[in-house]
Image (tube, helix red, strand yellow):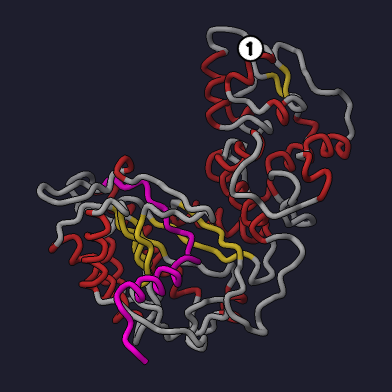
Amino acid sequence: MEPLTLDEKIRILTESARYDVSCSSSGSSRSNRKGGIGNAAASGICHSWSADGRCVSLLKILLTNHCIYDCAYCLNRRSNDIRRVALTPDEVAELTINFYRRNYIEGLFLSTGVVRTPDYTMELLIETVRKLREEHRFNGYIHLKLVPGADPLLVERAGRLVDRVSINLELPTRESLALLAPDKSREAILLPMRQVSGLITARRDEGRRAPPFVPAGQSTQVIIGASPESDLRIMTISEQLYQRMGLKRVYYSAYVPVTGDTRLPALNSLPLLLREHRLYQADWLLRFYGFTAYELLEADAPNLDPELDPKTGWALRHRQLFPVEVNRAEYEVLLRVPGIGVRSAKRIVRSRRVQRLRLEELARLGVVMKRARYFLTADGMTSGEADLSSERLKALLLPEKKKRSGPEQLSLFPTNDSDLSALTGEL
C-alpha cells in the first residue's frame, strides 16, 4: 500500500473527527503573550458554520484514528476496517500555524483515538499543544479532548496549556456504556471531570496571580439514540453535571449509524436530529430560564414532545398559571411565558419602569406574539382567544407544516420567526 500524502492524512482525520460536536470556541480569558500570534479572547474567535451545522472556525482534527477501544457506535473502533493514519505533534502544530496564517482558522480542536495506553496518548496530545504554545508562541484558542484513564498529573499539565477541555460522557448511563463501549468505564470518564472542576475552582480562589487553567471551562458530549434512555434521564444527568461539576456545556449528538453492530438499535420513526434539537432547547431552559429537569418532564411522560418546544409544552400542562400580566410579573415569571426569551424579558422589565406596556408594544421588544398571545395580558388586555381547550390551543401553536404532515427532520435553515426564535434560544 502506497504511503499517504499529508493532504490525504488530513482528509481522513478531519472526516473522522466530524462526529464530535463539542467544539465550542468561546469564553476564554487567557492572556496573550507579547510577541506571540493569535488571540484566544471571545472577540478573537469568529464563528462560522457549514451547511450541516458544524463549526468551521477551528481546525477540527484527530491526532490519529488508530484506537485500542472497540466502541460499537464509533467510526474509529478497533474492529472497523478503515484506513488508519496518524500525524505527529510537529505536523499538527505546523498545520495549525500555517492554516492560521492563511486566515483559514482561528484556533484548534484536537482529539484522538487511543493508542497503546491512555497515558501515552495523553503525552502525545500535550506535546502537540506545548509546541504550539512554547515553540510557535501561539496565543489562539485550543480545545483539547482529554483521554479517559490518563494520569491526573497529565490532565493538570494539559489544562495549563489549553483554553477548554472536554471528556465525552458518550452514553448517558453506566449500563449503556458497559454494553456499547465495554473497554471504557464511567469512573475513568468522571474522574478527570471532577479533577478539572476542582482545579478550576482552586484557580478561581487563588485570584488573578495564579497561572491559567482551562479558562474557558470544560464540556462533554452525550450520544442520543444509540441507547434506550429517556429524555428525562438524559436531562437529569445534564442537570447534575452543571450543578456538581460546573460544566460550561453538555452537547447532544444524534446517533449516526457509521458502522454495523447487533448491539445498536434500529433507528425509530422520530428523526433523531429533531430529538437532539428538543434536548438542546430543554438544556437552554435549564441553564438560562430557571427550569429543572423534573419541571420539563415527568416520570409518566419522560420524553419531549416532538411537535412543540419544551417551554410551550410546560405551559400547556400548567395553564392555571396563565395569563401573566407583563406590567406586574417578576422577571423569572416572564421567562416562563412561551415567546418571551431572556432578551425580551429584560427589555420588558426596563421598559415598564417608564411606561405601562400595551400589546402592540410587545412585538417591538422582541416577544414572539404568535406564541405569547395565549399566555399573557398587557394592561389587562389579551389578543388570544379565551377559554380554549388544551388540545385546541396546541393545534393553534403548531407550525403550519407540522399541522399538515406531523414531525419532520429539523431544517438547519430557519424559514419563519418561530424557527429562528427556537434556534437562538429565545423560547
Looking at the rendering, the stretch of residues picked out in magenta corresponds to 1-29
Q: Residue at x 40, y 46 (%)?
A: 47
Which residue appears farthest toward the top when viewing the image?
Answer: 355
- Left or right, 199 with respect to 37, comes to right
One can see residue 160 in this view: no
Q: Is residue 187 above or below residue 216?
A: below
- Left or right, 73 with respect to 158, comes to right
Write down the residue under mark 1. Answer: 357
**Per the image, is 26 magenta?**
yes
Q: Secondary structure at mark 1?
A: loop
Which residue appears farthest toward the left when viewing the image?
Answer: 35
Q: State the quadrant of the C terminus.
A: top right
Q: Residue at x 66, y 51 (%)?
A: 410
In the figure, residue 382 lies in which quadrant?
Answer: top right
Decide: few, some or many residues near mark 1? Use Cα within 10 Å; few <14, some 14-19, many ≥20. some
> Residue 148: percent from the left, percent from the top?
41, 74
Q: State the quadrant of the N terminus.
A: bottom left
Q: Residue at x 68, y 33 (%)?
A: 338
- Left or right, 272 with respect to 138, comes to right
**Per the image, is 227 magenta?**
no
